[in-house]
Image (cartoon, helix red, strand yellow):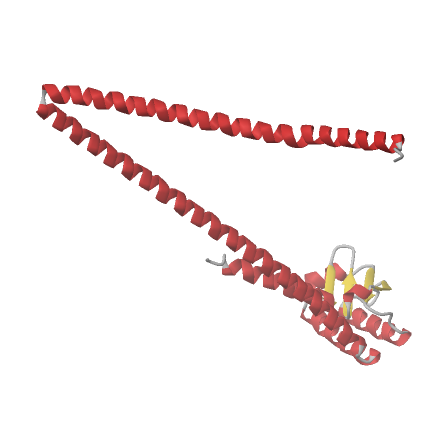
Amino acid sequence: MHLDWSTLALQTVNVLVLLWLLQRYLFRPVMAIIAARRQAAETLLTEAAQQRAAAQATAEDLARRAQGSAAEAEQLRAAAQTEAAAERARLLAEARAEIDKLRADAAAALRRDRAAQRHALESEARALAVTIAFRLLSRLPGPAATAAMLARLDADLAALPPEQLRALAGPLDVVSAAPLSAEEQAACAALLARRIDPSLSLQFSVDPALLAGIDLRAAHAVLRRSWQAELDRIGQDLTLEEADAGPVLA
């Protein structure tokens, strides 16, 4: 039989390291826990013995008093019963209060969990709505969708009060989800010149996140008329409705 002393030495070192790790991270904490629990048990036993001794002393004192005066013993017994009843009532009241608190905490935790789940579901629903809207809009004919967007923009500008129209008068960035053709840009420029200012300075840019529609971005005002803006507005309305509805009772 041939012994590989290097392997044997390595295994010995591994065993020693394992024993050291067990001693440091297992045996010591476990022994500390056992010692702590033993100390707590001894403390409880000591307190119980003291209480037992006190009770025994009280009983002996009552017995001595009973020997001297039966009437006095009866009074002491009645007082002890009254005190015990009061203590029992106090303990029952504390127990009921603790149970009520635990129920209230559990109900509050349940409401928080339901609110978090509802918020997560609403976020997923909004994300799904954006995806569906994007796919549906991608199938619409380009010229028809742009004409509809410009018609809606014209109606929205016509409904704005003069002070809001003046806030849009200035260098204006016309942002669309897809690039506008030269004819569409000309139609949009004519619409804005008629509704806002004939000398309006325009710049056209693209933001695919709008999904569809047109945003007008001035230095001090923004007119959002895109599908993304509508989805954001719907999400805010849902959030406000949830806040107005109040918490869900368990």
Depth check: 78 or 155 in front? 78
Q: Is residue 161 visible?
A: no
Q: Is residue 235 left or right of residue 131?
A: left
Q: Is residue 110 above or below residue 101?
A: below
Q: Position of residue 28 (x, y in %)?
A: 63, 28
Depth check: 185 or 108 in front? 108
Q: Is residue 240 left or right of residue 134?
A: left
Q: Position of residue 60 (x, y in %)?
A: 21, 21
Q: Residue at x 57, y 60 (%)?
A: 240
Q: Quadrant of the N terminus?
A: top right
Q: Position of residue 222 (x, y in %)?
A: 74, 60
Quadrant position of residue 214: bottom right
Quadrant position of residue 226: bottom right
Q: Is residue 171 above or below residue 46?
A: below
Q: Residue at x 59, y 63 (%)?
A: 238
Q: Is residue 5 above or below residue 206?
A: above
Depth check: 188 or 237 in front? 237
